Amino acid sequence: MGKHEGATSRASALYLRFPMKKIFALFLAMSLALPTTLHAGEGMWIPLLMKKLNYKDMKKAGLKLSAKDLYDVNHGSLKDAIVSFGGFCTGEIISSEGLILTNHHCGYDAIQKHSTLEHNYLADGFWAMTRAEELSNPGLFVNFLVRIEDVTKDMTKVLKEGMSEAERSAAVAERAKELIGKATDGTDYDADVESFYHENEFYLFVYEKFSDVRLVGAPPSSIGKYGGDTDNWMWPRHTGDFSMFRVYAGKDGKAAEYSADNVPHQPKHHLPVSLKGVSDGDFAMVWGYPGSTDRYLSSWGVQQAVDLYNPTVVEIRDAKLAVMRNYMQADPALNILLASSYAQTANYWKYYIGQTEQLVNNHVYQKKADLEAQFTAWVAAEPKRQAKYGETLSLMQQYYAATDASVKNQVYLMEAVIRGPSAVLFAYRTARALERGVSNPEMMAKMMPAIQGQAEGHFAEFHGESDRDLMAVLWKMYAANIPVGQQPRFIQNVVEVGSDFDAYAAHMYATSLFMDPARFAAFLAAPDSATLANDPLTKVANDFREAYFGGQDPTLAEKKTKAYRLWTAGVREMLPNEDWSPDANSTMRMTFGKVGSYEPKDGVTYNYTTTLDGVMQKEDPTNPEFEVPQRLKDLYNAKDFGRYADAQGKLPVGLITDNDITGGNSGSPLINGKGELIGIAFDGNWEAMSGDIFFEDELQRTISVDIRYVLFIVDKYAGARHLVDEMTLHY
């Protein structure tokens, strides 16, 4: 599920469908007075506010812990066992020696970087049998949350009536800088001030960052990615989606850069692991760092996603995947080299297919339109509301009407240029710095280590021929599908001289310093402005920058910002008894619910758990997505499951709950009412792919790998019993 990319803020120009009849307004006024209830599982809640908002409901649902057991600034608590893994996933600490569990797909890039044809850890798995065998991962980090503070009053006191959106933004940024400085002064901590409810509330998050994170173990992809793209976002699921890392600290216990002398980090808290299993209806909570949701998205936003944004992403990624697949199938070495990029591209290719389908199937547009109709009637009923919220929906309509014509171009700029050929992103990240440094040797010397580090990372996973082909294929599509007036200059230039994108891409490949490590190194040894300025990818990067940022009307962005700030405040005021949770924004959240089966359609019921039986039933030796390792088959045939079998003697593999998660939650712990680890969240289900925009109470499910399957693979399959022995097991 690893939603490492932003997901859902788009929409469409329909005309307002109101006014409403007076009788409806009267009915609405009466209905708004009735109390509303939290949908089962819905809500990604801020731990700081849990005691105030959620704790009583959690206790009723089956939580056995105190509020301080969950979140405490002064003493070790559950929040201290949850880490932001690399800034794109979640991990959990499961031993007193800093052992981390996360998803296989979260560790995939690290596993791929350590893989070679001789030691193919993607294909064969990896297990460190001693601490000395654990593998370092430059650039990988984990963040521990130190504390959260509500700074809404501090932030909003700098906002004045009549401020433009630009003035508001500047004032907020300046005040946030002051609060961050105050929170981190004299410490080694990092901090951020994040807005919630579309800039209606603000919270300060303080973190401790650890940069020595080592790979400890990973199953082969035939277990960790079992089912591949076919099963992605699907239930029933039989994927052992986990990997293991360890966080290290200096000998003084403080965060430190990698050193052979570092020691395993001693956390304030680690999660005990339950071997008891689960039953239908059991309490379950998920803690983690969900990336982004768009639950307050308007009906116009939904329509724009369905009609324009999502299909465009899919068509571009279709083409990108085809190019990479051709190279990967032809060469085992390239299959390793391009594996991580392919997996990331494929993940959200399928996501946008599913989201579009379920937005339609679940009638999300109409649900949004109905709420907007309620809002219109509520605003019209009171002059003060009219003055405060009267322009809200009009501003929204104006924004989406104005952006419908350009949204496909914005998608092409991101997906076909910056997220297309990897050399473009490298050029974009480094060309500006090089432009400044080429005329300033002192500045260049200071920047050189960072630039060389970026270059090393880029070329380590770079394949010039496939990048060249991506340029040709994607940019042909750009020229064919986007009006000339919206195209960046480099696309227009090629069209003007005959539209030979194959030749253009070949020229890039043969000449650009960003597409060859030797050329780039030679340039750094003797940098000159003419070579840099004339490099074709420097021109592409600059043209992208001009088209993407110069093509955005700041007044439109201001309309959108103001509209959603007013809309979010307004619906919360209109329905004060509703439990309005904030959108995800990559900060720590808690969601609670229960283990539960579901009925996706008439006559179909999905059980809440799967077993190793299903792995064997799906096996297809002709399909690499459904290959089963011989050792796993041997253990299955012998029924050698040890203490990890359930009461029926079967080995659990996956389970589902109705928790509310999204990308960034990948790797999050699934925790029972006693605070014990029972699984690792890794995916959502197909029938609720619209969930980032509208939570579907009856359909939405979190897919997790059962912790007993994880331990079985570590212990019985891999023979790494020493890793299980350092955990705290509860029977």
Image (cartoon, grey):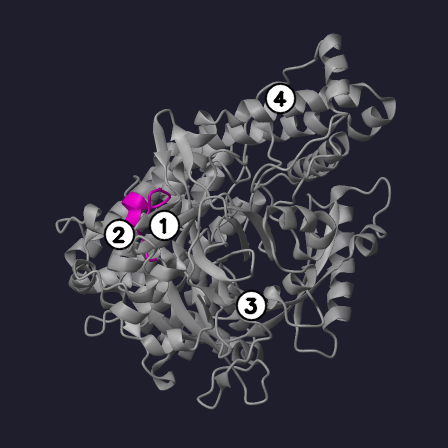
- The percent position of residue 310, horizontal first and vertical second, equals 44, 36
Determine crowd level at label 4: few under 14, some 14-19, many 20+ residues with C-alpha closer than 10 A: some
Report which residue position mark 3 lands on.
81
**Callout in the foreground (4, 2):** 4
**Callout in the foreground (2, 1):** 1
The answer to whether any part of residue 527 appears in the image is: no
Report which residue position mark 2 lands on.
324
Tell me which label, 2 or 1, sits earlier in the chain: 2
- The secondary element bearing badge 1 is classed as helix
The answer to whether the residue labelled 2 contacts the one labelled 1, judged by CB atoms less than 8 Å apart, is: yes
Per the model, the C-alpha gap separating discs 1 and 3 is 30 Å
- The secondary element bearing badge 4 is classed as helix
Report which residue position mark 4 lands on.
370
In the rendered image, the quadrant that contains the C terminus is bottom left
Tell me which label, 1 or 3, sits earlier in the chain: 3
Please name the amino acid that badge 3 sits on: Ala
- The percent position of residue 621, horizontal first and vertical second, equals 13, 51
Please name the amino acid that badge 1 sits on: Thr
Q: Is residue 467 above or below residue 555?
A: below
Determine crowd level at label 2: few under 14, some 14-19, many 20+ residues with C-alpha closer than 10 A: many
Residue beneath the point at 37% across and 38% down: 314
Per the model, the C-alpha gap separating discs 3 and 2 is 38 Å
Q: Nearer the viewer, residue 486 or 362?
A: 362
Residue beneath the point at 59% across and 29% down: 400
Say left or right for 620 vs 697. left
- The secondary element bearing badge 2 is classed as helix
**Callout in the foreground (4, 3):** 3
Report which residue position mark 1 lands on.
345
The answer to whether the residue labelled 1 contacts the one labelled 4, judged by CB atoms less than 8 Å apart, is: no
Per the model, the C-alpha gap separating discs 4 and 3 is 42 Å
Per the model, the C-alpha gap separating discs 1 and 4 is 35 Å
Look at the image and give the residue range highlighted in magenta. 227-240
